[in-house]
Image: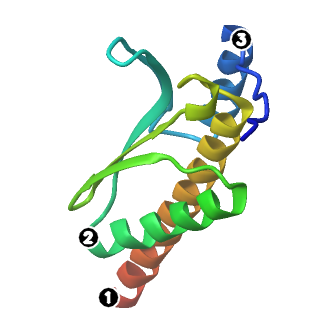
Amino acid sequence: MSYKFIPVLSEDSIRRGLQRINKLGSPYWDVELYDTPRMHVLKVHYKLKNFKTTWEFLNLVANQASKLRHHPTIITTYNNVSIECTTHDAENSITEKDVNLAEAIHLEYQELISKDVSKDVSKDVRMQ
C-alpha cells in the first residue's frame, strides 16, 4: 500500500492558521506538543449550554469531519467538549487538513452559540 505525502505546516503557517481561526472569537485554539508519543495537535475546549446542545454540536463536528475526510479526537463530558486535531499520516504533526477542520469546527460552534443566544433573547422578550 502506498501513502500519499502530506506536507507538515511550518510554525509560521500554523500561527497564521490559528490567527484566522481565532479571529472568529473565543474560546481560542492553540498548539500543544505531547512528548509520549511525540505529537503536535491543534486543541480547544468548548463549554456548551447543556447536554442537548453538546450533542447538537458533536453532530455538527461529525458532519464537518465527514465532509473534510479528516477526524478529530473528541473528549466530552456533559457540556464540556475538548477537541484535538493532528494528522496521523504525517507523523502526528499539524497539516492544512487540521487547520481546515479546526476552522470548520469553530465556525459551527460560533453559529450554534449565536443561535442559542438569539433563542434566549427572544424568550426574554416574550416574558416581558
- Toward the left, the furthest residue is 78
Q: Residue 30 or 9: which is nearer the viewer? A: 9
Residue 115: where, in percent of width, then height? 52, 71
**Residue, x 34% and y 86% (percent of image)?**
128
Label 3 sits on a secondary structure element that is loop
For badge 3, the amino acid type reads Ser
Q: Is residue 114 found left or right of 35 in the rendered image?
A: right
Q: Which quadrant of the structure image shows residue 116?
A: bottom left
Q: Which residue in the structure is indicated by mark 1?
A: 127
Residue 87 seen in the figure: no
Asked if the residue at tag 2 contacts the one at tag 1, i.e. Cβ–Cβ closer than 8 Å, the answer is: no
Q: Which mark is residue 6?
A: none
Q: Judge depth for marks 2 and 3 and give the one in front.
A: 3
Q: Which residue in the structure is indicated by mark 2?
A: 51
**Residue, x 26% and y 68% (percent of image)?**
50
Distance between the Cα atoms at labels 2 and 3? 37 Å
> Nearer the N terminus, badge 3 or badge 1?
3
Residue density around tag 3, few if under 14, some if 14–19, many if 20 or more, within 10 Å: few
Q: How many marks on residues?
A: 3
Residue 68: where, in percent of width, then height? 71, 55
For badge 2, the amino acid type reads Phe
Asked if the residue at tag 1 contacts the one at tag 3, i.e. Cβ–Cβ closer than 8 Å, the answer is: no
